[in-house]
C-alpha cells in the first residue's frame, strides 16, 4: 500500500537536507592505508634536522631494498637541519617537486614551535606554512604523508649539562603533541597518509623508565639516536600498512603420506626426506630487514624481527630428537623436533646466509647515507642560510652588513646544482652495488641429526 504521508515526509526531509548541506560519511575521503610503491616510483622524505640525520630514512630504505629487491624505488632525502615549514617551501620546487614523487612524507614542527610553551601566533604561522606545503605536494601530483613531530625528551634535557628554560622543559613536549594532533585531523579529514611518530617514542620511553629512570632514545632531547630512529622507521612501515611476515615454510605429510611443502614469500623445491634427514631448496622473494648494530636497542624494544620480518620454519615430518640445521653447508643451530613442529623463526639469527646478505645491504646503504646523501644535504643547508638571510634583508633593506652577508652566501651557492647532481650520482653508484647483492639466492636447507646423536 502506498503511504502518501510517509512519502511526503521523506521528500521533505531530503529537500531540507540538501538545502542545509547535510554532510554524510560519503562526503569524506578515506585516509591513505598503504604506500603502494612500484618500480620507478619516488618517495621523498621532507623534513628538518631529524630527517637530515639520514637514519630513519636509511632504515626505511633498508626495508624496501630487502623486502622488495625486484623494485628499483627512488628515495630522496629532503631534510635540512633547523628547517621550519617556511624553509621547506623555499626549496620545494627543486628539492621536492623536481623528483616527481609519488609520496612525500613530512616531518616538520620541532623547530616551528620555537621550543617554548604554546603560542597561538606561532602555531598560526606553522598552520599557514604547513597547509601550503601540503597543497604544494598535491600540486605536484604526489600524496602527502603527514607525520607528527617526534618527542622532546625533557628528562634527557634535565640530565644534560646545558641549563634550559623551565617552561620549555615542562611544556614543549605537549606543544608537539598538539601540533601532531592537528596534523592527524588534517590527514583524516582530507584523506592523506598519517604516521604517528610521537606516541610510539613516548610510550616506549615510559615503559623503559619503569625499570631504568635514565633511559632515553634522544640523548640531546631533540634528535633521536639510532635506536629512536628505527622506532621512527617502524612507525612508517606500520602506519603505512607495509608490515607483514617475510616468509613461511611448512613441511608436512600430505593426504597420501607423501612429504609436501606449503610456503609463502618464496618457493620450496627439490624436497627430499630420507630416514632422519630432510633437505630442500628455498628461493625467497626477499631478505630479512636488517639494520646496523647501533640501532639494535630499538630493534629489541620493538621486537622488530617478529613483527615486520618474520622468517618462519615449521617441520612436521621428523621423528623426535635433536636436529642440526645447515643452510648452504653452514651450521645455523640445533633444534628439537618438537620445537621445529611448533615453528622456529630465523630472521634474527645472524649466521644465516640471508641475514649476512641483508647485513651487507645495510652496510652499503649506511655508507651511501653517511657519505654522498649527507653531503648533498649540506648543500641545501647552505641554501637555507642564504634564503633566510635574503628574507631578512627584505625586512631590513638598509642593513649594509646583512646585504653583504646575503651576497657572500649567494656566491657560495653558485654551482650548487652541479654539486648536488654529483653527490646524487655517487649515491646512485652505491645503490647500484646494493641491487647487485640484494637479490635473493636459492639456499639449500638440510636438517639431520648431529654427528654422534642417537634417536630419543
Image (cartoon, rainbow, N blue to C red):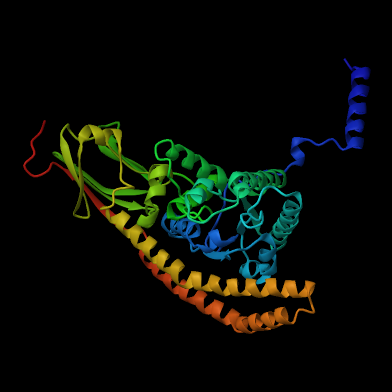
111 over 26 or under it: above or below: below
Q: Looking at the image, which residue is at 60% across and 82% down?
A: 412
Q: In this image, 156 relative to 137: left or right?
A: left
Residue 97 position, x and y percent, is 66, 67
Q: Do we see residue 443 in this rendering?
A: yes
Q: In this image, 224 relative to 314: left or right?
A: right
Give the quarter of the figure containing the N terminus: top right
Q: In this image, 389 relative to 54: left or right?
A: right
Residue 11 position, x and y percent, is 91, 27
111 over 215 or under it: above or below: below
In the foreground, 357 or 130: 130
449 over 417 or under it: above or below: above
Q: In this image, 70 relative to 126: left or right?
A: left
Q: Do we see residue 265 in this rendering?
A: no
In the foreground, 438 or 83: 83
| Label tally | 0
Instruction: Identify the image quadrant of residue 448.
Output: top left
Q: Looking at the image, which residue is at 65% across and 61% down?
A: 84
101 over 393 or under it: above or below: above
Residue 379 position, x and y percent, is 57, 75
In the foreground, 360 or 295: 295
Give the quarter of the figure containing the C terminus: top left
Extreme-top residue of the structure: 1
Residue 56 position, x and y percent, is 49, 56
Q: Looking at the image, which residue is at 53% across and 50% down?
A: 236
Amino acid at each position: 500500500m502506498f503511504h502518501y504521508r510517509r512519502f511526503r515526509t521523506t521528500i521533505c526531509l531530503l529537500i531540507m537536507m540538501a538545502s542545509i548541506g547535510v554532510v554524510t560519511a560519503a562526503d569524506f575521503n578515506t585516509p591513505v592505508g598503504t604506500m603502494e610503491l612500484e618500480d620507478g616510483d619516488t618517495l621523498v622524505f621532507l623534513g628538518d634536522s631529524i630527517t637530515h640525520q639520514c637514519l630513519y630514512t636509511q632504515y626505511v630504505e633498508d626495508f624496501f631494498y630487502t623486502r622488495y629487491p625486484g623494485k628499483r624505488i627512488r628515495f630522496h632525502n629532503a631534510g635540512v637541519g633547523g628547517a621550519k615549514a617556511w624553509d621547506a617551501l623555499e626549496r620545494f620546487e627543486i628539492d621536492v617537486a623536481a623528483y616527481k614523487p609519488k609520496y612525500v612524507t613530512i616531518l616538520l614542527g620541532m623547530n616551528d614551535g620555537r621550543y617554548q610553551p604554546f603560542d597561538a601566533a606561532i602555531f598560526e604561522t606553522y598552520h599557514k606554512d604547513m597547509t601550503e606545503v601540503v597543497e604544494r605536494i598535491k600540486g605536484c601530483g604526489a600524496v602527502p604523508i603527514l607525520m607528527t613531530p617526534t618527542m622532546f625528551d625533557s628528562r634527557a634535557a634535565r640530565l644534560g649539562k646545558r641549563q634550559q628554560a623551565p617552561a620549555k622543559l615542562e611544556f614543549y613536549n605537549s606543544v608537539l603533541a598538539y601540533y601532531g594532533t592537528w596534523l592527524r585531523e588534517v590527514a583524516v579529514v582530507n584523506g592523506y597518509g598519517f604516521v604517528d611518530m610521537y606516541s610510539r617514542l613516548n610510550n616506549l620511553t615510559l615503559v623503559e623508565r619503569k625499570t631504568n629512570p635514565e633511559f632515553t632514545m634522544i640523548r640531546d632531547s631533540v634528535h633521536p639516536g639510532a635506536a629512536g630512529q628505527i622506532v621512527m622507521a617502524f612507525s612508517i612501515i606500520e602506519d603505512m600498512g607495509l608490515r607483514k611476515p617475510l616468509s613461511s615454510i611448512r613441511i608436512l605429510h600430505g593426504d597420501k603420506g607423501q612429504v609436501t611443502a606449503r610456503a609463502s614469500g618464496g618457493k620450496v623445491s627439490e624436497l627430499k626426506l630420507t630416514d632422519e634427514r630432510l633437505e630442500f631448496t628455498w628461493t625467497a622473494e626477499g631478505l630479512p630487514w636488517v639494520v646496523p648494530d647501533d640501532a639494535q636497542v630499538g630493534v629489541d624494544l620493538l621486537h622488530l624481527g617478529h613483527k615486520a620480518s618474520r622468517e618462519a620454519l615449521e617441520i612436521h615430518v621428523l621423528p623426535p630428537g635433536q636436529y642440526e640445521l645447515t643452510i648452504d653447508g653452514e651450521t645455523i643451530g640445533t633444534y628439537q623436533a618438537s620445537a621445529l613442529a611448533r615453528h622456529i623463526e630465523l630472521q634474527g639469527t645472524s649466521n644465516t646466509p640471508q641475514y649476512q646478505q641483508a647485513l651487507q645491504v645495510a652496510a652499503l646503504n649506511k655508507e651511501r647515507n653517511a657519505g654522498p646523501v649527507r653531503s648533498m644535504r649540506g648543500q641545501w643547508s647552505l641554501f637555507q642560510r642564504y634564503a633566510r638571510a635574503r628574507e631578512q634583508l627584505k625586512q631590513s633593506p638598509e642593513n649594509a652588513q646583512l646585504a653583504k652577508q646575503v651576497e657572500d652566501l649567494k656566491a657560495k651557492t653558485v654551482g650548487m646544482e652541479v654539486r648536488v647532481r654529483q653527490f646524487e650520482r655517487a649515491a646512485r653508484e652505491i645503490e647500484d652495488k646494493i641491487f647487485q647483492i640484494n637479490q635473493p639466492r636459492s639456499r639449500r636447507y638440510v636438517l639431520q641429526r648431529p654427528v654422534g646423536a642417537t634417536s630419543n
